[in-house]
Amino acid sequence: MRPKILLTNDDGVTSEGLWAAYDALASFADVTVVAPSSQQSAVGRSISIFEPIRVTKIPIHNTEAYSVGGKPTDSVIIGIYSLNLNPDLVVSGINIGENLSYESIMTSGTVGAALEASNQGVPSIAFSLEVEDQGKKFDDPRYSEQNFGAAKTAIIDICQKLLKNGFPQDTDVVNVNIPSEVTGGYEITHLAEKLFFTGVEERIDPRGRPYYWINGPLCSDAEVGTDVHAIHEGRISITPITLDSTAYPGKNGLENLFYEDIS
């Protein structure tokens, strides 16, 4: 039987990256698209709990998709609990723009959707494609100039391997990043510390009041073995991620600090 895959993203249901992923996955699986109706990048794992979520079934790219008026996590929850899709796998992406390092996966809506799926008991993989020009992340995702060929090949291979063999022990999400130009194979990586050198630019509006842009250049490279370094070298980065954020080595230190108060 063909596996069932719930496909989502954070660039919106019309994103060219999402439909490139659909084309790849549909070659071997039954795929249902449940994705945000609009751009939701950098919302992380936020969830809509103060407003209703509207879902519209729309025809797009010769199939029917569910357009969700909410966050990527909302789309996953709707797909699992309202549409009762019972997927074997959740795939999030292809995101237009890389999702590397501690700071990126904590804010990424693409990775956030995958984390939510895993937390709900469904194995999940996030796919992101590097962009050379960071400004491309803010263009209309319906008309991307990215070449998705290498990403589509990676999606087929990686998803089929993991569906066949299962996820490695203690791995909740597999985070995959594809360089804009692939010159090597796969590299199993760990997260780099940073993707950007964070900065803030102050400007003055026409009324003389200050406003701010959070900005900063990309880190050009990182230590060997990290996802950032793999992409820099032209290799496809595959990083295992866990939902458990507990700092286990820190437990002993805290137990020593609070030993008199521990019952």
Image: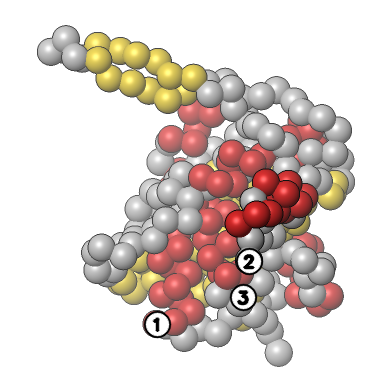
Q: Residue furthest front?
A: 260
Residue picked out by circle 1:
82
The relative height of residue 63 versus residue 187 in the rendered view (above or below) is below
Q: Residues within 10 Å of mark 2 (few under 14, many from 20)?
A: few
Kindly state the secondary structure of the residue where label 2 is placed: loop
Q: Where is residue 140? Give x, y as percent.
A: 40, 41
Residue in front for this viewpoint, 145 or 86: 86
The relative height of residue 100 versus residue 199 in the rendered view (above or below) is below
Residue type for callout 3: Val
Could you tell me if the residues under marks 2 and 1 are in contact, i.e. CB atoms within 8 Å?
no
Q: Residue at x 81, y 46 (%)?
A: 189
Image quadrant containing the C terminus: bottom right
Q: Which mark is residue 35?
A: none
Residue type for callout 2: Ser
Q: Report the Cα–Cα distance between label 1 and label 3.
A: 15 Å
Q: Where is residue 262? Give x, y as percent.
A: 63, 61
Q: Earlier in the sequence, mark 2 or mark 3?
A: 3
The relative height of residue 193 versus residue 174 in the rendered view (above or below) is above
Describe residue 124's horizontal placement relative to residue 225 as left or right. left
Q: Where is residue 50? Give x, y as percent.
A: 25, 63
Q: Residues within 10 Å of mark 3 (few under 14, many from 20)?
A: many
Q: Residue at x 24, y 11 (%)?
A: 204
Residue picked out by circle 2:
263
Q: Quadrant of the rendered structure where residue 82 is? A: bottom left
The relative height of residue 135 versus residue 148 in the rendered view (above or below) is above
Q: Quadrant of the rendered structure where residue 174 is? A: bottom right
- Residue 148: in sight, yes or no? no
Kindly state the secondary structure of the residue where label 1 is placed: helix
Residue picked out by circle 3:
122
Q: Report the Cα–Cα distance between label 2 and label 1.
A: 44 Å
Could you tell me if the residues under marks 1 and 3 are in contact, i.e. CB atoms within 8 Å?
no
Residue in front for this viewpoint, 127 or 62: 127
